Image: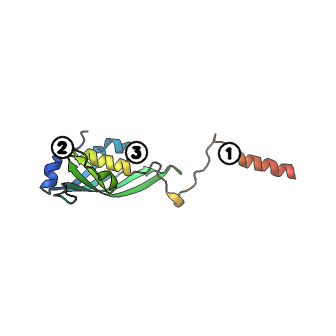
């Protein structure tokens, strides 16, 4: 199956204040697909991107991404929904603007004739995903399975208790 392609001229897109929006299937994002569960109905990622003529003295782009992913909880190993609502602001220029490193809320996009928007969306989703997603306090404790060892400190406590008797 062929993945979706979407390419723009970043500088032209920003200066003309163009806008695009749509949705991507998880199949269109192969690196992300390896980290999420395939479940029906097929999960989609909604995006909206618009150009900005020069909020910081340079042309810019705003990207909004909505994704409702399904991942595996790393504590109980059950399915876990992972909603991501992301917003990004970028300045567009040929070279990395000086002083931009000090502003964490704005990133830099290189001015390119053929920029891959789908790859940018996938990169931002991958960076936003937790390293080890868990349900948090609502997580069910996973029962011990055959072949797993019990806690060695519990065994020591039992030996001490038996010895004191």
Q: Is residue 70 left or right of residue 120?
A: right
Marked residue nearer the N-terminal end (1 or 2): 2
> Residues under labels 3 and 2: Cα distance?
29 Å
- Farthest residue in the front direction? 98
Q: Quadrant of residue 83?
A: bottom left
> Residue 57's spot in the image, x, y percent?
19, 57
Residue position marked by numbered label 3 in the rendering:
35
- Say if 146 sits above or below 75 in the image: above
> Residue 131's spot in the image, x, y percent?
45, 48
121 or 134: nearer the viewer: 121
> Residues under labels 1 and 3: Cα distance?
30 Å
Q: Describe the element under mark 1 as helix, strand or loop.
A: loop
Residue position marked by numbered label 1 in the rendering:
150
Label 1 close to label 3 by CB (< 8 Å): no
> Residues under labels 1 and 2: Cα distance?
57 Å
Q: Describe the element under mark 2 as helix, strand or loop.
A: loop
Residue position marked by numbered label 2 in the rendering:
112
> Residue 58's spot in the image, x, y percent?
19, 54
> Residue 81's spot in the image, x, y percent?
41, 56
Which mark, by number, is residue 19? none
């Amino acid at each position: 199956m062929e993945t979706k392609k979407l390419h723009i001229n970043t500088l032209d897109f920003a200066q003309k204040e163009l806008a695009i929006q749509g949705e991507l299937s998880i199949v269109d994002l192969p690196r992300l697909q390896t980290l999420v569960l395939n479940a029906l109905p097929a999960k989609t990622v909604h995006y909206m991107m618009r150009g900005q003529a020069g909020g910081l003295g340079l042309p810019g782009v705003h990207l909004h991404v909505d994704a409702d992913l399904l991942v595996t909880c790393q504590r109980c190993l059950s399915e876990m929904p992972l909603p991501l609502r992301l917003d990004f602001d970028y300045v567009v220029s040929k070279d990395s603007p000086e002083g931009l490193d000090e502003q964490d809320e704005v990133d830099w996009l290189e001015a390119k004739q053929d920029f891959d928007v789908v790859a940018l969306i996938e990169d931002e989703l991958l960076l936003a995903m937790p390293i080890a997603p868990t349900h948090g306090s609502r997580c069910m404790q996973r029962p011990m399975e055959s072949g797993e060892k019990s806690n060695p400190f519990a065994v020591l406590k039992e030996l001490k208790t038996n010895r004191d008797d």
